Image (spheres, rainbow, N blue to C red):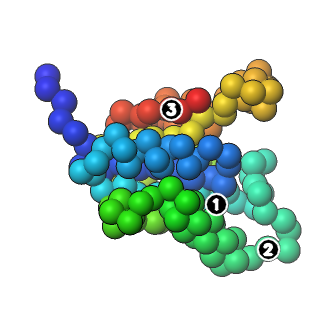
C-alpha cells in the first residue's frame, strides 16, 4: 500500500503550551495540505474546563478563536497562513477531535502531547492524556509531538 501525502490535516488546539510546535510541524511536514486549526473549548462542567462559572459560551468561543488566531500569527509565514482555516468547537477534546476528523474528511491529525516534564509525568501517572485518547479513538493517522 502506497501512502500519499494528506490533503487535509487537523491540528487541535486546547490553549496549552507547545501547540505552536504542532502547527509548525504540520505546516512544514505537509506543505501541500490544507491545515484545519481546531480550537476546542471544553464545557464549563468538564473537569478540564478552563472556564469559570460566570463565562458565557459565546465569550469562551470568541476567546478560543482569538487564541487560535494568535497561535497562527506566531507560527505561520505569510505563504503558509493561507493554507490554515480556523474552526471552533465546544466539547471534550477526546470526543470532538476524533468525531471532527471522521466527519470532515481529515487525512491526518497532529497534536501536542502532554510533554516530558513533571506535568506530563503526572498526567500520564494519574490518567490518560488527551493525546492518548485522541490516538485511541481516531481512525486516521495521528502524530503526537512530545
- What's the distance in space between the residues labelled 3 and 2, CA to CA? 31 Å
| Dot 2: element | loop
Q: Residue at x 53, y 33 (%)?
A: 145
In three-dimensional space, the C-alpha distance between marks 1 and 2, rounded to whole angstroms, equals: 12 Å
Check residue 91 in the rendering and tell me which mark sits there, or answer none. none
Residue at 70% over, 77% down: 59
- According to the picture, the residue beneath numbered tag 1 turns out to be 41
In front: label 3 or label 2 = 3
Badge 3: how crowded within 10 Å, few (<14), some, or many (20+)? some
Q: Is mark 3 on a helix, strand or loop?
A: strand
Q: Nearer the viewer, residue 144 or 124?
A: 144
Query: On the rendered image, what quadrant is the C terminus found in?
Result: top right
Residue 55's disc number: 2
Q: From this viewpoint, which residue is outermost toward the right?
A: 53
Compared with residue 95, is residue 40 higher up or lower down, i.e. above or below? below
Place of residue 49 in the rendered image (x, y in percent of width and height, measured from the top left): 75, 55
Q: Specify whether residue 43 is in view.
A: yes
Q: Which of disc 2 and disc 1 is earlier in sequence?
A: 1
Spot occupied by residue 45 in the image (x, y as percentages of width and height): 77, 57
Q: What residue lies at 44% left-to-right and 42% top-to-bottom?
A: 25
Q: How far apart are marks 3 and 1 (CA)?
A: 20 Å
> Whole-percent x and y of residue 40?
58, 57
Evaluate if marks 3 and 2 touch, with contact meaning CB atoms under 8 Å apart.
no
Q: Which residue lies furthest to the left in this view?
A: 2
Residue ID for mark 3: 144
The local secondary structure at tag 1 comes to strand
Q: Vertical placement of 87 versus 98: above or below?
A: below
Name which of mark 3 and mark 1 comes first in the sequence.
1
Amino acid at each position: 500500500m502506497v501512502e500519499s501525502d494528506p490533503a487535509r490535516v487537523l491540528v487541535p488546539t486546547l490553549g496549552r503550551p507547545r501547540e505552536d510546535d504542532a502547527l509548525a510541524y504540520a505546516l512544514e511536514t505537509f506543505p501541500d495540505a490544507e491545515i484545519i486549526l481546531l480550537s476546542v473549548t471544553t464545557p464549563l462542567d468538564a473537569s478540564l474546563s478552563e472556564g469559570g462559572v460566570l463565562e458565557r459560551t459565546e465569550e469562551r468561543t470568541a476567546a478560543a478563536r482569538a487564541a487560535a488566531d494568535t497561535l497562527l500569527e506566531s507560527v505561520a509565514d505569510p505563504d503558509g497562513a493561507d493554507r490554515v482555516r480556523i474552526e471552533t468547537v465546544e466539547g471534550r477534546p477526546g470526543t470532538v477531535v476524533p468525531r471532527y476528523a471522521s466527519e470532515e474528511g481529515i487525512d491526518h491529525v497532529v497534536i501536542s502531547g502532554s510533554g516530558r516534564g513533571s506535568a506530563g509525568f503526572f498526567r500520564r501517572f494519574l490518567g490518560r492524556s488527551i493525546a492518548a485518547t485522541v490516538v485511541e479513538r481516531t481512525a486516521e493517522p495521528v502524530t503526537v509531538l512530545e
